[in-house]
Amino acid sequence: MLTPETAVDVVANAVHIIVIVVSVLVVPSLIGGLLVSIFQAATQINEQMLSFLPRLLITLGMLVFAGHWILGTLSDLFIETFRQAGRLVG
């Protein structure tokens, strides 16, 4: 039976997995953006493409590098959610 506690557990598990998956993509991009910003401040080069392109390439690289893990993690989440849905409804 679906009680408020089990609903909170299902949602909390989903949010936890989504935060982990998003951080795998966002944290390297933030670190790359910080390094580019430090470089721009040191050299006084103020070019917008210099700040955008490395972050884009880092994010795409992380998608290529961790894409298989991300898809596997999200599929496991959906499979487990549907398994729990069958038990919780009845």
Image (tube, rainbow, N blue to C red):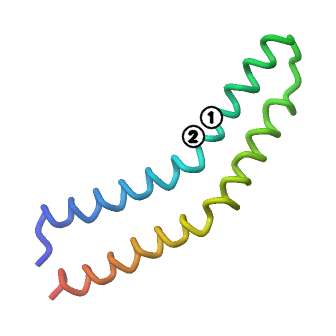
Name which residue lies at 21% across and 61% down.
Answer: 9
Q: Position of residue 29 (x, y in %)?
A: 66, 40
Indicate whether 40 appears above or below 84: above
Name which residue lies at 55% across and 70% down.
Answer: 71
Secondary structure under the numbered disc 2 in the rendered image: helix
Q: Position of residue 52 (x, y in %)?
A: 79, 36
Q: Residue furthest front?
A: 65
The amino acid marked with disc number 1 is: Leu
Q: Position of residue 77 (x, y in %)?
A: 39, 71
Q: CA distance from mark 2 to mark 1?
A: 5 Å
Indicate whether 11 appears above or below 45: below
Which is nearer the eye, 24 or 79? 24
Secondary structure under the numbered disc 1 in the rendered image: helix
Contact check, label 2 and label 1, Cβ < 8 Å? yes
The part of the image, by quadrant, that contains residue 67 is: bottom right
6 left or right, relative to 59: left
Assign the C terminus to one quadrant of the image: bottom left
Give the label on residue 45, or none: none
The part of the image, by quadrant, that contains residue 87 is: bottom left
Name which residue lies at 13% across and 61% down.
Answer: 5
Indicate whether 24 appears above or below 74: above
Q: Position of residue 8 (x, y in %)?
A: 21, 59
Which is nearer the eye, 55 or 65? 65
45 left or right, relative to 7: right
Assign the N terminus to one quadrant of the image: bottom left
Indicate whether 79 appears above or below 7: below
The amino acid marked with disc number 2 is: Val
82 left or right, relative to 6: right
Q: What is the number of callouts on the image?
A: 2
Name which residue lies at 67% across and 26% down.
Answer: 34
The residue pinned by badge 2 equals 27
Give the label on residue 30, or none: 1
